[in-house]
Amino acid sequence: MKTNINPEFIECTASASASTANLGPGYDVFGLGLDALEDIVTVKVDKRPKPSKKNLEINIKGNRNENIPKNPDHNTAGIVARKIISDYDLYSYNFLLEIEKNIPVGYGMGSSAASAVATAISFNCLFGLEMDETRLLDYSAEGELASAGVKHYDNIAGSLFGNFVIVKTYPRLEFIKIKSPNNLIAVVCVPLINVPKMKTEVSRGVIPKNVPLEKAVHNIANACSIVAGFYSRDIQMICNGINDCIIEPARKKMIPGYDKIKNRSMEEGAMAFTISGAGPSSIAFLNSTKKGLHLAEVMREEYKKLDIDCETYLTKPSNGSKIISTK
Ligand code: HSE
């Protein structure tokens, strides 16, 4: 690994999209980038008079800037930046991270992943670090420690690469990218309920530690259907697999009205419905924008009955993170 290097630019801006993880049975394995929203990160660099460990500051702007820690040790992008600065010995520079936060924070749309990914690709570009895709995936996932307490790669993979990604972590980190069918549509419904700090860690805590073999078999079969569906661009086959008997039953208790909204969505045209990542957002899949718009209305109506505000996003798979500009 190169260390003590010079920046090729003084500033780099990158974007990374929202994402959904798991798709039901693919817990910690499946990620899908979603093009409805993106976070944008600008990394600015200048030379310090003396090398120092206190060389990172964060500014947050955008629609979702509430309650985001500016302390780099608690901020997903900050953690990624610190790790890269340390590994590549970049202490002779000052860094300012400007994060434009547009993805709702803590609602299961891969908000922390997007800021982390945009930060990692910006550093890679600024210093010409020549990280390969696996290394970028691994650095970006450092940020998940801030919200989940563990490195999970599914949202990161969806946000970094776009489309559908399978991530394997044992015996080593590997990923498989598959292009999504063109007419795959998702509707994400975000109930604006209070979410705990470290929400992902909390919602990982409710999942059973041991699983009966028949449930594992059920989920593996469904996960295979999802993968086969993406390979053959068959939306019905994908949706037939979005059915999970392990994670959803445990987590849905944390989401008010989940069963009602799921049943109603399935009656009104959803081809599949599950929790988006660690929730509390849910996600429905289908193959038509018109039906998707109708479904978004149905979801809003159901939450209104519960007196809960919600946001809905009609989205398609995203194309992956990108560098927007350099100076
Ligand atoms: N796989 C992770 C989880 C995704 O379900 O906890 C979090 O967005």
Image: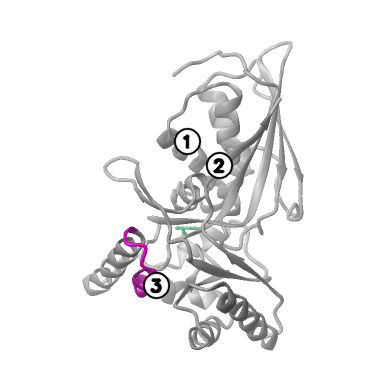
In the picture of the structure, the residue carrying the numbered disc 3 is 239
Res 326 label? none
How many residues crowd mark 3 within 10 Å: few (<14), some (14–19), many (20+)? many
Asked whether residue 270 is drawn in magenta, I would say no
How many angstroms separate mark 1 from mark 2 (CA)? 8 Å
Question: Which numbered mark, 1 or 3, is in the foreground of this view?
Answer: 3
Above or below 175: residue 196: below
Pointer 1 residue: 136
Q: Measure how far apart labels 3 and 2 are at the Cα level.
A: 28 Å
Range drawn in magenta: 231-246
Q: Earlier in the sequence, mark 1 or mark 3?
A: 1
Amino acid bearing label 2? Val
Do the numbered discs 3 and 2 sit on residues whose CB atoms are within 8 Å? Answer: no
> In the displayed structure, does residue 31 sit left or right of residue 304?
left
| 313 lies left or right of 159 | right
- Sequence-wise, the earlier of marks 3 and 2 is 2
Mark 2, residue position: 117
Q: Residue at x 53, y 62 (%)?
A: 202
Q: Nearer the viewer, residue 81 or 223?
A: 223
Residue 97 percent coordinates (x, y):
70, 35
Label 3's element? helix
Mark 1–mark 2 CB contact (< 8 Å): yes
Q: Name the spot of residue 284 as percent of width and height, x first.
A: 51, 73
Amino acid type, residue under disc 3 in the picture: Cys
Question: Could you tell me how far apart the alpha carbons at marks 1 and 3 are, in whole angstroms?
Answer: 30 Å
The reply to whether the residue tagged 2 has its Cβ within 8 angstroms of ligand 1 is: no
Residue type, mark 1 in image: Leu
Closer to us: 129 or 27: 129
Decide which of 142, 40 is in the foreground and name it.
40
Would the CB of label 1 be found within 8 Å of ligand 1? no
